Image (cartoon, grey):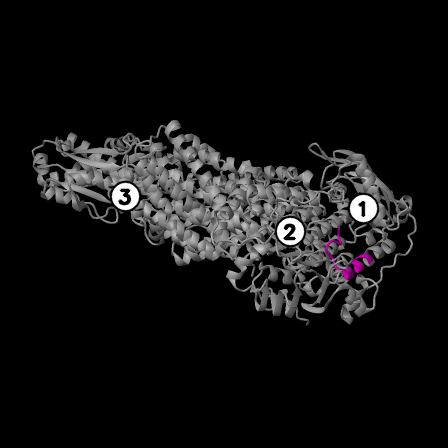
């Protein structure tokens, strides 16, 4: 009883402290509204809008058909350039791709001489270079094939391939971007709030005061976990319902309640992590750095930015220890694929275990750092 | 009001209000007018919270004038130009223990910082520091960090910092609060000596010690934001007809307040055989410094036991050990006969503790603080309401009950701390200098309450104090010096043992004995024989220049020193980034590979199996067991087990032979669009391959007779992850880490109080900000060089282009990054907000909008705007250009322009966001 009331009272104190910092409240509101909106809408809606420069030395029907194949939103309209402009244009980053259609291309093709189109790819543009090169090859190949087949007066293709997208039929990027951004904000805010709240208590000497009272470190910790967790949970529910659901008008499948449960577990893990950092760092400047150094890999390597399965094995393994990895999987399953508890329970379990480990770790550190 | 021919300070109709909302508005000064004569020692006396500190803050220029006129040293303090010119002539020491000091810097470094700020040369600085530390007895501790000093030593250091530049007007806000009697004597001797040398210097002092006030030239008695009376101490006594100032002060108060004052009467105590607190050989060592050295005492239940001793003698440490906050090195201690156990919650319930420094929640109002503590001590329901009301009345907190402690005067905060310490009716009270900074009336009512608790409720009170009249009220007391208890007895007995007329004399006699034994040339030698060094040219400092590199560098120096004191931070910044380059460089892969798929083959003919085989041959896909139904496809995709499901329709083989164009359906998991898109591309590619094979086999047409595409990956022909990622990761880390390093630079000073140095010294906003920025620019560049070295020598990612161009760009870029951190720091007012704000303005724009993954040209919406102005976007292009494309300045100069523009813009916005005075 005393245990619970202490946790409740200390938590209410955290909430009051938070409400005394209007700038922080404003930043939280921004993070869960405008920031999500801009992240969601800025990720290229169309897959590429890739820039392409073409040196066309064979003004033939075929070469124009190929160039017509480069359509928005995948490609910006191809720019006619000269040989000299190929290198300088790529150096300056004006073109991600340059294409050189050799002289007499169509003629050679029809004569069966297998002419070669040169495709240069700027490999530094990592997201476009590889998938884009694949697209271009396909466009060329299919245009050439249909051209040849039509020329040889053949009918339709022997087999049609129909590609359909599940869950997000138009591959609307903002869907993914928005949910991912909500997840990023949840992680970011919960770690910062709890870690900083602990350091603040230490820097202002108030933790010392708590420790002469009949209050235990577990209570101090749990109070921070529930109060800061609640703030973030409410903010994210608001963001999902109104920013993602209403403003961005993204149809979310699955149960919001189940997602919230998952988010609560995730918050248990991240708030514990925050407190853990608060016990490791000696001062706010140290904590700030520690947070930055953790947030970057959490954001980039948890599968929210590039697919997990294509990361090196070792990174995949390491990132299994990060709550975000499981939370992103859980969120995608629930919100996009409409998965139920039967499917996401392993992620929930993982979150609970990671949270528990961090919590115990933080608790033992807190006890030590306070004595 | 009497006019003076040469008043140094002249206030007219000055009104100052605090509080944001109308309901919490507090009027600190109410249409106050005052002329302060120059060249004199002027004392401000009055109860806590009557506006003394506000008045001093206005006069010093630390606080902005709201209404009325404030003229100081012949100029208007509302005028920024006059403030700038006069601030080297004014020295201000704010209230609170070491509020304007930097805790991680040593005494010497703190003093050096202030000396530099006022443009002193190294030689001059050293002379002055030597002089000041010797006269205040700090000379033996010059290398100790300010944060580790006792309260009294912090006050002395604060005074030294104020005196380092020979001010014409010295403003001291309760400078001797928490300072022991001996040190107080030294303190006033020092001031007297300085006044001898510089007779035209005016001094304004607020004090709670009436014996000090008696020695001043001229007094101002204040109450409720207004002046009650002014005049020499003699005039004051004459006017009130009292024989000492303490009583005169009480007599000056309005009727209602005077009625609150109670005489302190100590009823005799009945001896108790119960021992409440006991310590044997209690010892505490910090490293090789023994703070408390085998201390013994026994305190009976209901006794008021006093602790008297010089600053830093181990009083606070002893008290902390008793509360269980500090583990002891040796010895044993008992509370209620039980050994002290930090984990014993029941004992904590019976003890009340008040620490020396204010340690309640400044974000909670007075009532909320009381309520929180009452609840944590399990006082419930009606009883809590009643108890809180009771302590509010007893400690006169009524008028401030809904205010935040941060805005309250020291004395009121002390009252709140004591109220909190007693709210749960503890049986033992451990009070560490509870009355420091409290006005005489409130102090007496404090004691009335303590005595009542002791006599009526048998509460044991263990109290430390610097007031002799308070020590006299104790039942018994210990004299402590240098970690040892010199003697313990009743105050009267101690006096007799020494044959001294007053307790103070007895105390000094004891200390002198102890000092003689330990160190003959102790700092307690109150005689200052040493003449001040003649080399010092004492006189008014010349007016400060508008911009001074020395002031700028003094902040740089301070910041660098703080960074050096905290090597963990520097190491984190340097090695953390190395680790991240590594992880991210390897982690982000360019190819989407190992995609799991499954086939639902309704046909099960050789033709359909051939199609499946064709898929299985692809290096991009990993086959999982075949599907049996559409439902299974759904289920497995929902669980994220497969990202592609291929459905071969019934009759595929037959239709194919008939030329009826069968349709193969590819179901792609669209939840991650980038991946889905790649899968789509791969699937189509494989399908085309299949068609070609088909054509060759069945129609005898060599579809390969088409065209070849010669694919060349420029700049990274082998398509390795690292060469592609490293040039992108460096800009991101070089944004975030330096920004976070500076993000707390200003806001931390705001939160800790040392920002006041910026308000009242000649340093300008530009100097302040740039000065703070420079050390982190250096650290950032070091970070950059390490990352580049790592890339070149460890990852084999060569810098193909001009290294000089890259370094130059990095320098500009680091200026941008640190500038961004400072901007957040200047605008925001709490450290938490600054950390969060910095993460928001760096992480998302740098990672998402600057072209690391998606090029800026492909962005839409707000992303385009950010992508075009954000420094990372430009530095990323430069970095990739130099690393991978072998470019140099001639190709990349255009990207330098936005970086060059961003630096002054960030600085100007920071300047605009940074207030030059407290509001």
Q: Is residue B896 magenta?
A: no
Q: Is residue A257 visible?
A: no
Residue that carries the numbered disc 3 in the rendered image: A163
Q: Is residue B442 magenta?
A: yes
Verify CB contact (< 8 Å) between mark 1 and mark 2: no
Residue that carries the numbered disc 1 in the rendered image: B307
Vertical arrangement, residue B223 with respect to residue B734, above or below: below
Left or right of A106 on screen, residue A231: right
Element class at badge 1:
strand
- Front residue of A172/B786: it is B786
Q: Which mark is residue A10?
A: 2
- Is the residue at mark 1 from the same chain as the one at mark 3? no
Left or right of A220 on screen, residue B315: right
> Residue A204, how many percent across, how many down?
63, 48
> Residue A323, how many percent across, how many down?
50, 40
Label 2, label 3: how far apart the Cα atoms are: 55 Å
Q: Dividing the image into 4 quarters, which one contains the C terminus of chain A?
A: top right
Left or right of B531 on screen, residue B683: left
Residue A240 quadrant: bottom left
Direction front: furthest residue: B534
Ranked by sequence position, the earlier of labels 2 and 3 is 2
Give the letter of the chain under mark 2. Answer: A
Q: Is residue B496 visible?
A: yes
Closer mark to the observer between disc 1 and disc 3: 1
> Residue B787, how many percent across, how many down?
41, 34
Closer mark to the observer between disc 2 and disc 3: 2
* Range of magenta residues: B430-447
Badge 2, how many Cα within 10 Å: few under 14, some, many 20+? many
Residue B668 quadrant: top left
Label 1, label 3: how far apart the Cα atoms are: 85 Å
């Amino acid at each position: 009883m005393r245990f619970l009331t202490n946790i409740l009272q200390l938590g209410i104190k955290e909430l009051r402290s938070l409400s005394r910092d209007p700038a922080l409240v404003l930043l939280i509101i921004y993070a869960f509204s405008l920031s999500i909106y801009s992240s969601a809408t800025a990720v290229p809606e169309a897959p590429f809008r890739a820039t392409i420069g073409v040196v066309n030395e064979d003004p033939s029907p075929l070469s124009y058909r190929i160039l017509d194949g480069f359509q928005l939103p995948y490609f910006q309209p191809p720019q006619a350039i000269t040989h000299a402009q190929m290198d300088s244009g790529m150096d300056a980053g004006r073109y991600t791709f340059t294409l050189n259609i050799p002289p007499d291309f169509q003629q050679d093709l029809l004569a069966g001489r297998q002419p070669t189109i040169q495709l240069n790819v700027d490999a530094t543009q990592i997201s476009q270079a590889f998938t884009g090169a694949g697209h271009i090859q396909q466009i060329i190949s299919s245009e050439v094939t249909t051209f040849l087949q039509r020329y040889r007066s053949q009918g339709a293709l022997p087999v049609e391939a129909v590609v359909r997208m599940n869950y997000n039929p138009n591959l609307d990027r903002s869907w993914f971007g928005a949910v991912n951004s909500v997840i990023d904000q949840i992680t970011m805010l919960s770690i910062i709030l709890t870690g900083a709240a602990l350091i603040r208590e230490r820097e202002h000497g108030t933790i010392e005061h708590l420790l002469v009272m009949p209050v235990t470190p577990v209570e101090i910790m749990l109070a921070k976990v529930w109060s800061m967790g609640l703030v973030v949970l409410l903010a994210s529910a608001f963001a999902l319902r109104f920013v993602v659901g209403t403003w961005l008008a993204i149809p979310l499948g699955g149960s919001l309640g189940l997602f919230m449960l998952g988010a609560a577990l995730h918050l248990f893990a991240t708030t514990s992590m925050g407190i853990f950092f608060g016990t490791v760092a000696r001062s706010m400047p140290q904590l700030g750095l520690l947070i930055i150094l953790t947030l970057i890999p959490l954001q980039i390597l948890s599968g929210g930015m590039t697919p997990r399965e294509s990361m090196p094995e070792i990174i995949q393994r390491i990132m299994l220890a990060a709550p975000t990895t499981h939370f992103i999987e859980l969120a995608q399953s629930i919100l996009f694929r409409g998965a139920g508890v039967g499917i996401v329970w392993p992620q929930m379990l993982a979150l609970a275990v990671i949270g528990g480990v961090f919590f115990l770790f933080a608790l033992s550190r807190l006890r030590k750092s306070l004595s | 009001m009497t006019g003076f021919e040469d008043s140094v300070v002249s206030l007219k109709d000055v009104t100052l209000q605090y509080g944001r909302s109308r309901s919490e508005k507090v009027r600190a000064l109410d249409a106050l007018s005052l002329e302060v004569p120059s060249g004199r020692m002027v004392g401000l006396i009055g109860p806590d919270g009557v506006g003394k500190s506000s008045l001093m803050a206005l006069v010093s220029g630390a606080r902005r004038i709201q209404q009325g006129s404030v003229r100081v040293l012949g100029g208007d303090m509302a005028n920024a130009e006059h403030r700038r010119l006069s601030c080297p002539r004014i020295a201000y020491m704010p209230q609170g223990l070491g509020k304007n000091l930097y805790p991680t810097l040593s005494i010497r470094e703190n003093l050096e910082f202030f000396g530099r700020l006022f443009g002193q040369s190294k030689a001059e600085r050293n002379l002055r520091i030597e002089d000041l530390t010797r006269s205040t007895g700090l000379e033996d501790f010059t290398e100790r960090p300010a944060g580790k000093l006792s309260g009294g030593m912090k006050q002395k250091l604060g005074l030294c910092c104020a005196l380092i530049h020979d001010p014409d007007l010295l403003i001291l806000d309760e400078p001797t609060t928490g300072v022991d009697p001996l040190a107080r004597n030294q303190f006033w001797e020092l001031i007297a000596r300085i006044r001898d040398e510089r007779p035209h210097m005016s001094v304004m002092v607020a004090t709670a010690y009436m014996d000090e006030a008696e020695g001043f030239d001229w007094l101002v008695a204040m109450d409720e934001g207004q002046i009650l009376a002014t005049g020499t101490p003699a005039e004051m006594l004459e006017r009130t007809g009292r024989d000492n100032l303490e009583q005169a002060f009480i007599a000056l108060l309005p009727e209602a307040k005077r009625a609150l004052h109670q005489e302190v009467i100590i009823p005799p105590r009945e001896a108790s055989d119960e021992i409440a607190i006991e310590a044997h050989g209690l010892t505490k060592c910090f490293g090789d410094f023994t703070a408390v050295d085998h201390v013994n005492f026994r305190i009976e239940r209901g006794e008021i036991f006093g602790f008297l001793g010089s600053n830093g003698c181990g009083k606070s440490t002893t008290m902390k050990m008793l509360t269980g906050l500090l583990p002891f090195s040796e010895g044993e201690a008992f509370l209620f006969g039980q050994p002290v156990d930090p984990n014993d919650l029941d004992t904590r319930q019976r003890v009340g503790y008040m620490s020396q420094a204010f340690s309640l929640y400044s974000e909670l109002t007075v009532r909320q603080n009381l309520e929180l503590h009452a609840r944590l001590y399990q006082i419930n329901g009606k009883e809590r309401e009643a108890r809180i009301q009771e302590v509010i009345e007893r400690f006169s907190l009524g008028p401030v009950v809904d205010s935040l402690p941060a805005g309250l005067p020291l004395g009121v905060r002390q009252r709140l701390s004591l109220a909190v310490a007693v709210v749960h009716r503890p049986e033992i009270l451990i009070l560490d200098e509870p009355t420091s900074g409290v006005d005489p009336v409130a102090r007496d009512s404090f004691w009335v309450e303590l005595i009542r608790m002791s006599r009526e409720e048998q509460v044991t009170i263990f109290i430390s104090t610097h007031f002799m009249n308070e020590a006299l009220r104790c039942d018994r007391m210990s004299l402590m010096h240098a970690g040892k208890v010199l003697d313990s007895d009743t105050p009267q007995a101690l006096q007799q043992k020494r044959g001294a007329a007053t307790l103070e004399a007895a105390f000094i006699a004891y200390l002198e004995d102890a000092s003689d034994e330990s160190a003959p040339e102790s700092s307690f030698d109150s005689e200052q024989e040493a003449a001040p060094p003649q080399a010092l040219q004492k006189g008014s400092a010349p007016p400060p220049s508008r911009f001074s590199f020395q002031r700028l560098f003094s902040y740089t120096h301070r910041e660098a020193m703080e960074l050096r004191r905290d090597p963990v931070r520097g190491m984190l910044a340097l090695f953390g980034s190395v680790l991240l380059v590594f992880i991210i460089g390897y982690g982000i892969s360019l190819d989407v590979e190992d995609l799991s798929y499954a086939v639902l083959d309704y046909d099960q003919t050789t033709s359909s199996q051939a199609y499946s085989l064709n898929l299985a041959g692809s290096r991009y896909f990993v086959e999982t067991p075949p599907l049996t139904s559409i439902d299974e496809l759904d289920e497995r995709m929902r669980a994220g087990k497969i990202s592609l499901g291929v459905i071969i329709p019934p009759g595929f083989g037959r239709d194919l032979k008939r030329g009826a164009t069968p349709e193969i359906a590819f179901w792609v998991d669209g939840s991650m669009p980038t991946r889905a898109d790649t899968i789509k591309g791969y699937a189509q590619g494989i399908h085309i391959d299949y068609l070609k094979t088909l054509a060759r086999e069945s129609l005898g047409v060599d579809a390969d007779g088409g065209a070849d595409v010669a694919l060349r990956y420029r700049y990274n022909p082998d398509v390795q992850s690292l060469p592609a990622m490293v040039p992108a990761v460096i800009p991101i880390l070089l944004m975030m880490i330096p920004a976070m390093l500076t993000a707390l630079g200003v806001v931390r000073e705001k939160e800790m109080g040392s920002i006041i140095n910026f308000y009242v010294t000649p340093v300008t906003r530009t100097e302040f900000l740039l000065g703070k920025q420079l050390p982190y620019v250096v650290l950032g560049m070091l970070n950059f060089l390490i990352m580049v070295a790592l890339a070149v020598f460890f990852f084999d990612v060569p810098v193909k282009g001009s290294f000089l161009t890259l370094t130059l760009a990095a320098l500009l870029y680091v200026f941008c990054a640190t500038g961004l951190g400072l901007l957040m720091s200047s605008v925001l007012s709490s450290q938490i907000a600054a950390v969060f704000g910095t993460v928001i303005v760096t992480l998302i724009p740098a990672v998402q909008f600057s072209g690391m993954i998606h090029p800026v040209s492909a962005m839409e919406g707000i992303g385009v705007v950010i992508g075009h102005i954000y420094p990372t976007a430009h530095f990323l292009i430069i970095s990739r250009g130099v690393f991978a494309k072998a470019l140099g300045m001639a190709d990349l100069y255009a990207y330098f322009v936005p970086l060059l523009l961003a630096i002054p813009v960030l600085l100007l916005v920071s300047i605009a966001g940074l207030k030059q005075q407290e509001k």
